[in-house]
Image (spheres, rainbow, N blue to C red):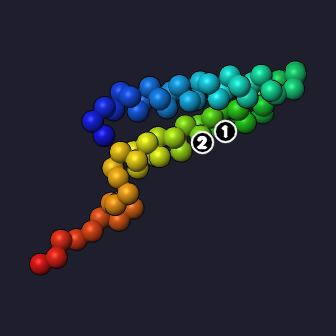
Amino acid sequence: MKRPWFLVGAVLLVFVALAAILLQFMPRPLKDADYLVVGSVSTLVSLLTAFLMVAMAKGSSGVFVKRRKKK
């Protein structure tokens, strides 16, 4: 990936936006477990976003398997 700052910014944006949206939909009053759930879901979606962006940048070949050159 040529621009790692773009990846970092996109992942942070997804994390913050999703956390804010989830906090708005959680019923009040919020408990410690509610913040744990919001943070966990936001982290999971952010990591999935990072994985998909790196996979798309690398192309369809070579994401999971590195092919050997034939001799």
Image coords of residue 20 (percent x, y): 68, 22
Where is the C terminus found, in terms of image quarters? bottom left
Residue farthest right in this picture: 28
Which residue occupies 60% across, 42% down? 44
Could you tell me how far apart the alpha carbons at marks 1 and 2 are, in whole angstroms? 5 Å
- The amino acid pointed to by label 2 is Leu
Q: Taking 49 as reference, is 15 above or below it?
A: above
Question: Which residue does the image show at 87% across and 22% down from the upper left?
Answer: 28
Q: Residues within 10 Å of mark 1 (few under 14, many from 20)?
A: some
Q: Which residue is mark 2?
A: 44
Under circle 1, the secondary element is: helix
**Left or right: 68 as drawn, with respect to 53:** left
The answer to which of 36 and 46 lies nearer the viewer is 46
Tell me where residue 1 appears, x and y as whole percent. Answer: 30, 40
Labelled pair 1, 2 in contact (Cβ < 8 Å): yes
**Residue shown at the point (78%, 31%) measured from the top left:** 34
State the residue position of label 1. 41
In screen coordinates, is 25 left or right of 8?
right
- Label 2: element kind: helix
The amino acid pointed to by label 1 is: Val
Structural crowding at the residue carrying mark 2, measured as other residues with C-alpha within 10 Å and reported as few (<14), some (14–19) or many (≥20)? few
Above or below — where is 20 with respect to 36?
above
Q: Residue 11: horizontal and vertical position, in percent? A: 49, 32
Residue 68: percent from left, percent from top: 22, 71
* Res. 22 image quadrant: top right
Quadrant position of residue 9: top left
- Left or right: residue 16 versus residue 51 is right
